[in-house]
């Protein structure tokens, strides 16, 4: 590679810095939901899980070798046990079964509350159960995120923050008073093509 | 892989679709902008971006967890865009210039404009041949290492280094006053 003069080198570094500051166009908000609407939860067999785990690089220090060796032996013992079990007994979550079998629609909810330590979605989709659906903090985006799998229909929902504060979805345009001093957001699931209306 | 991504991929392979939503949110912007550059159409870019993520999800079991995830995803996007343009019998939006025919003369008296900004650099980038443009964006906008750029673009380490350096020189030529 040709050697560049010093002043040119300085320009190249400056250009590189400007490239880093280029503003990208934001993709439409529906993108993630549309992707999730097209995929089904994966079902990894036990042996695929072991194979994946073996391919994942791990750092092992000599002090940790003994527990790791014991773990490997335990895995083989478990494999031998599982081989003799009915495949129907494999553990899947109830949510995976519902999404796979009932043709539910996937809806993404986001909340911009970096001060929160725990955020749950509560709503009419689970009869306002005290056990809300826990959201996950996406540190790269700085947002709380959850995917709900719902049948067609209309739902009221809200976010419960740190098990204390109840807030409506700031992105929902239409709200309804719940009669207890709070406002719920309204979500309408359409025809199962991944489109939903948050009103 | 980025911090926490191995765990995410593991969760996805175990049936957690929510975890894939985080992957999509993390990388949708660079992939969408790649498709915008390739097609010049927002609708086509959206369709291709979605297809990229769906395809990556379908092939996730084949992904090597010891390799970086984003370059793998980017390569998939590049291939999908190329196939799309071929099927649509459209030539790419960007100009094509074979690397061998490319020569750069460095004039020491050239000076880069003082008031240049990122927007001007973006406009100049649009006129660069796609191979240089993508290498520069991957390296300096997405922050990939040189070897990761090579992985994404199917180049050796030295070829990726050369591509990036010559791309910068070419860009400088376009921006000098």
Image (cartoon, coloured by chain):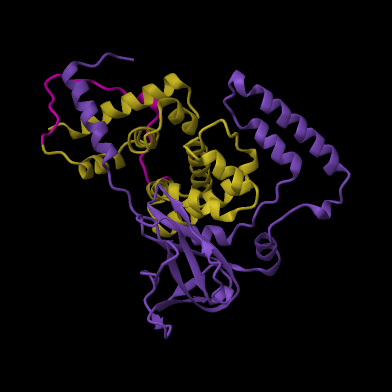
Chain colours: A purple, B yellow
Quarter of the picture containing the C terminus of chain B is top left
Return the x and y of residue A195 as percentages of the image width and height. Answer: 51, 70
Q: Is residue B158 above or below residue B122?
A: above
Give B60 or B40, whichever is nearer the viewer: B60
Could you say which is closer to the camera, residue B159 or residue A137?
Answer: A137
Residue visible at 16% across and 20% down? A7
Q: Quadrant of residue B164?
A: top left
Would you say residue B100 is visible in this rendering?
no
User: What's the magenta region?
Assistant: B92-114
Residue placed farthest to the right in the image?
A: A84
Horizontally, is A33 left or right of A87 in the view?
Answer: left
Residue at the bottom extreme of this rendering: A179
Q: Residue at x 46, y 74 (%)?
A: A197
Q: Is residue B119 above or below residue A149?
A: above
Task: Specify whether A5 is left or right of A167.
Answer: left
Magenta includes A36? no
Asked which quadrant contains residue B17, the reply is: bottom right
> In the rendered view, does A144 fall on the left or right side of A71?
left
Predominant secondary structure, magenta span? loop
**Residue at position x 65%, y 41% in the image:** B61
Residue B169: x %, y % from top left: 26, 26
User: Looking at this view, is B121 or A27 the one in front?
Assistant: A27
Q: Nearer the viewer, residue B130 or A70?
A: A70
Give the total of numbered labels.
0
Q: Residue A4, image x and y in percent?
A: 24, 16
Left or right: A37 as drawn, with respect to A90: left
Residue A182 appearing in the image: yes
Residue B108 x/y as whole percent: 15, 19
Residue drawn where x is 49% and y is 67% of the image:
A121
């Amino acid at each position: 590679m040709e050697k560049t003069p010093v002043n040119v080198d300085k320009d190249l570094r400056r250009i590189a810095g400007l490239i880093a500051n280029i503003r990208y166009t934001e993709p439409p908000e529906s993108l993630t939901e549309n992707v999730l609407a097209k995929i089904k939860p994966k079902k990894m067999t036990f042996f695929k899980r072991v194979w994946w785990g073996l391919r994942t690089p791990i750092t092992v220090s000599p002090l940790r070798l003994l527990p790791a060796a014991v773990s490997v032996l335990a895995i083989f013992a478990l494999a031998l046990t599982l081989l003799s079990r009915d495949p129907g007994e494999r553990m899947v979550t109830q949510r995976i079964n519902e999404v796979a079998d009932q043709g539910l629609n996937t809806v993404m909810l986001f909340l911009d509350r970096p001060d929160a330590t725990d955020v749950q979605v509560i709503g009419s989709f689970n009869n306002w159960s005290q056990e809300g659906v826990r959201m996950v903090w996406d540190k790269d985006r700085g947002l709380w995120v959850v995917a709900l799998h719902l049948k067609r229909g209309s739902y009221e929902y809200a976010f419960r923050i740190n098990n204390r504060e109840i807030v409506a979805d700031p992105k929902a345009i239409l709200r309804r008073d719940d009669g207890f001093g709070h406002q719920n957001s309204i979500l309408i699931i359409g025809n199962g093509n991944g489109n939903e209306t948050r009103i | 892989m980025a911090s926490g991504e191995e765990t995410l991929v593991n969760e996805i392979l175990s049936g957690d679709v929510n975890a894939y939503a985080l992957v999509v949110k993390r990388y949708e912007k660079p992939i969408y902008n790649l498709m915008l550059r390739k097609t010049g159409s927002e609708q086509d870019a959206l369709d291709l971006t979605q297809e990229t993520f769906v395809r990556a999800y379908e092939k996730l079991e084949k992904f090597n967890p010891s390799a970086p995830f984003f370059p793998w995803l980017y390569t998939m996007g590049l291939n999908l865009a190329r196939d799309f343009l071929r099927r649509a019998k459209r030539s790419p939006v960007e100009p094509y210039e074979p690397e061998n025919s490319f020569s750069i003369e460095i004039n020491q008296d050239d000076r880069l404009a003082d008031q240049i900004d990122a927007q001007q650099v973006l406009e100049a980038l649009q006129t660069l041949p796609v191979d240089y443009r993508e290498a520069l964006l991957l390296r300096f906008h997405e922050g990939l290492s040189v070897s990761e750029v090579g992985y994404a673009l199917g180049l050796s380490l030295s070829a990726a280094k050369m591509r990036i350096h010559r791309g910068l020189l070419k860009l400088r030529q376009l921006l000098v006053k």
